[in-house]
Amino acid sequence: MPRDMQQYLRPGLTSTPFCPGCGHGILMGLILRAIHQLELNMDEMLFVSGIGCAAWIPSPHFNADTLHTLHGRAIPAATGAKMFNPKLRVVVVGGDGDLADIGGNHLIHAARRSMDLTVICASNMVYGMTGGQVSSTTSVGAFTQTTTQGNPYQSLNLCKLVIAAGATYAARHSVTEPFALIASIKKALQINGFCFIEVLSPCPTQFGRHNQLDTPVAMIKNLMETCITKKKAKKLSPEELKGKIITGEFTNGAD
Amino acid sequence: MVRYYLSGNEAIVEGAIRAGCRYYAGYPITPSTEIMERISVRFNEIGGVFMQMEDEIASICSVIGASWAGAKAMTATSGPGFSLMQEGIGYAAMTETPIVVVDVQRAGPSTGQATRVASGDIMQAKWGSSGDYQVIAVSPWSVQEAYEQTINAFNLAEKYRVPVLLLTEEAIGHLRERVDVVKDIEIFNRRKKPGAAPFGSEERDGVPPMPTFGEGAKVLVTGSTHDSYGFRKTDDPLVQDRLVSRLNEKIINNREKIIDYEDYYLEDATVVVISYGITARSSLFAIEALRAEERKIGMLRLKTLWPFPDSLKRNIGARANVLFVPEMNKGQVAGEVRKYVSCPVVTFTQTNGEVIYPDAIIEQLRRYL
């Protein structure tokens, strides 16, 4: 990480626990760049996370107050801290299993309340930490430890979900779109209200190896092929859009 | 002194506010709901934060978040809601987060009889979450004491950085009685020491000072095993052992300071009733009736249920011929008493959703007098 980012990292840390090829390290860097560009004071920031690989993005790495809570419960813990001290700028970072599955109810209700939180969901479409089981964002047909014949269920569209629940801002980007992602994180940090960003992050270790994408390069390439911007998607037929993941901003009411 | 006429649930709210509680999150559940209703109104008047959350899990987690943001924070629930909160109680114990959880016990198991009384959550209160941890649990026997014990619960939570459970019962929650509020009540606020390790102590049973979010302390809080500065140490046996031992010993070694009780007619008693909550009132009524017949009977009333007053029991157990434990459960405290005494422990259990009446206790006691 470049030297000017060092100030945002907790002193004494020399490495992350992420596997080779994991996208979470990229996301970690992009969150810090957004904070750096906005010149935010880390003393006024609180990072809350639950359980899972993505929960380790802020905890212990970020040099701010960090609350590493129970599985799925980052949003209610963040709600309590934010409601009692509204001066705190509260950012929730979690995975798809944590925020959308076990914590899905809290996600919906925080959006409904327009709780002033920035929620970043690092979605690798699998339960990484427990060894690669299917999650609610795993695409139909994908192979995991618990869907050895292909995932029979459709995946949850988290941006649509939070918008329907009343989120102020929602966006989806892949870690392969770093500049768009930084821009979205900056927006989310500045907008009052419930802001949600789904970040597609590759997991070659637990997802890739079951889906013929077992190298970091193969996963990144696959993400670049699968993700398509909203602008480009408009020009494509529903047939052509099949299996694609649309990225971009999904602000309230627009889509 | 000011005199009020309140229900137990209302008195809990007033006690919490008096103790400095300014954050409450909860989810409606009978028979505790009046607590959230009243505190939502009272916080409008005095400037606290009230949140009705989507479930009990969110309630306790938001209370934990608020506590780290500097609040004295509370939630209240009952039976099934208390079960949902257990993971959060374990997390609060592990992260040494001061919170107060009120359980207005109702008849279980499961949904049971929502409007009827029981005291079936005594063991759940101690053992409901995973691993080895300690909580403090207090049990009032009157509306007056619901008020006082709530203040005590906050003081203990702040002093020992531990979740404190106010285990009351439907009968106390809905009972209306006089409450005398005095001016001078000791209020304890959490100890702060900038720069000090927030999760470690040089003493094996020490309680570290607690920083607050937003003060630049860059606190690192985790429910994983952590060192004294909060860094995860998930494969270090020494750190695990030291942390778990301290979490337990900071309560166990201070139990003489924590435990509160009252005794009645114990000087010459050969039969001793051990009782708590609303049942202790029936017990005292029964004992006074039997004392009028010059029966040598006394009572130990437990105001603290956890940590368990083991030495107290041992002393009484050495003097008495028989211990008698009436409870609105299948003998949860009686089982605990048996661990510490050699004399016979007789249980009188009632799980029909009604309070145990004095007559029933008298009838049972006569068999041993």
Image (cartoon, coloured by chain):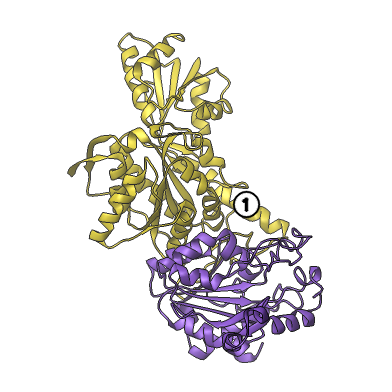
Chain colours: A purple, B yellow
Q: Looking at the image, which is closer to me, B90 or A236?
A: A236
The kind of residue tagged 1 is Val
Q: Classify B31 as above or below A123.
A: above
Left or right of B43 in this view: A17: right
The residue under the point 30% across, 50% down is: B37
Q: Specify few, some or many for label 1: CA neighbours under 10 Å numbering under 14, 14-19, or 20 or more.
A: some
Say which quadrant the C terminus of chain B sits in: top left
Q: Looking at the image, which is closer to me, B299 or A193?
A: A193
Q: Is residue B364 visible?
A: yes
Residue B201: give x, y in percent of width and height: 56, 59
The residue under the point 57% across, 51% down is: B247
The residue that mark 1 highlights is B244
Residue B128: give x, y in percent of width and height: 56, 43
Q: Classify A127 as above or below B218.
A: above
Residue B180: give x, y in percent of width and height: 22, 41
Q: Classify A240 as above or below B49.
A: below
Residue A73: give x, y in percent of width and height: 53, 60
Left or right of A40 in this view: B245: right
Say which quadrant the N terminus of chain B sits in: top left
Q: Classify A143 as above or below A10.
A: above
Q: Looking at the image, which is closer to me, B271 or A176?
A: A176
Tag 1, which secondary structure?
helix
The disc numbered 1 marks a residue on which chain? Answer: B
Q: Is residue A92 visible?
A: no
Q: Looking at the image, which is closer to me, A214 or B76?
A: A214
Quarter of the figure with residue A143: bottom right
Quarter of the figure with residue B170: top left
